[in-house]
């Protein structure tokens, strides 16, 4: 039996463990973020995407990471304030993790390893790489940093998964 995203836990800003089973039955977009990245302007687009589809069973899970050129220097309350106040995001944002390299978080090992997830074998190349997860907790697609959350491709894939068409 292949693993799913539901087999993992993440830590919130206060270090409390949150089971990703809590998101069972929802379509997920998992994104590695960084406050000092050029792509940080995608926070606003991600929030718009979240508000558009949230009532239909869609969630965005953000994982801040300092894995690329030290573009996420913030941690703890400072990072939470940046996300909640400065960027005004309401979707779940977790504690800073590694998304590539020797200390890669188990969630990102799963997301980027075809041997573990059965479908995608692509690690993030930069911040704001996006993984799309179906209602069964399986990785079904990914989008590079350059792909805007507002792109037709992203919207079409989310809508198809929400409507059980994929």
Image (cartoon, rainbow, N blue to C red):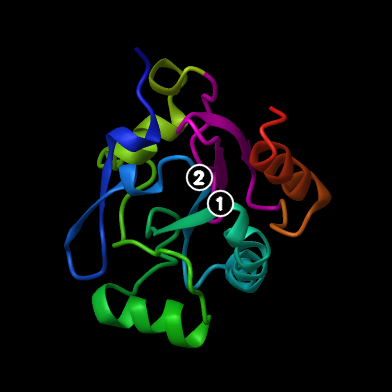
Q: Position of residue 65 (x, y in %)?
A: 38, 58
- Residue 80 is left or right of residue 32, and the answer is left
Magenta stretch: helix, strand or loop mostly: loop
- Quadrant containing the C terminus is top right
Residue located at (56% from left, 51% from top): 57
Quadrant in which residue 46 is drawn: bottom right
- Residue 101 is left or right of residue 139, and the answer is left
Residue beneath disc 2 = 26
Q: Is residue 77 magenta?
A: no
Residue located at (54% from left, 50% from top): 126
* Total count of labels: 2
Instruction: State the residue in front, 15 or 76.
Output: 15
| Distance of label 2 from label 1 (alpha carbons) | 5 Å
**In the rendered structure, which disc, 2 or 1, sits on the residue that comes first in sequence?**
2
Q: Mark 2–mark 1 contact, CB under 8 Å?
A: yes
Q: Position of residue 149 (x, y in %)?
A: 69, 57
Please tell me whether residue 47 is drawn above or below residue 139 in the rendered image: below
- Quadrant containing the N terminus is top left
- Residue 101 seen in the figure: no
Please tell me whether residue 42 is drawn above or below residue 127 in the rendered image: below
Q: Check disc 2: other Cα within 10 Å, few if <14, some if 14-19, many if 20+.
A: many
Which contiguous range is marked in magenta? 119-146
Residue beneath disc 1 = 57
- Residue 156 is left or right of residue 6, and the answer is right
């Amino acid at each position: 039996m292949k693993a799913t995203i539901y087999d993992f836990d993440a830590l919130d800003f206060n270090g409390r463990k949150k089971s990703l089973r809590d998101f069972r039955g929802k379509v997920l977009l998992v994104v590695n973020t960084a406050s000092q990245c050029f792509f940080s302007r995608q926070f606003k687009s991600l929030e718009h995407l979240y508000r558009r589809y949230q009532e239909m069973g869609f969630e965005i899970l953000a994982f801040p990471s300092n894995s690329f050129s030290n573009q996420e220097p913030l941690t703890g309350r400072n990072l939470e304030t940046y996300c909640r106040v400065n960027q005004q995001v309401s979707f779940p944002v977790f504690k800073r993790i590694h998304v590539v390299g020797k200390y890669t978080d188990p969630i990102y090992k799963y997301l980027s390893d075809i041997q573990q997830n059965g479908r995608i074998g692509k690690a993030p190349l930069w911040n704001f790489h996006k993984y799309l997860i179906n209602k069964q907790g399986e990785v079904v697609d990914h989008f590079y940093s350059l792909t805007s959350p507002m792109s037709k491709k992203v919207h079409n894939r989310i809508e198809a998964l929400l409507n059980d068409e994929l």
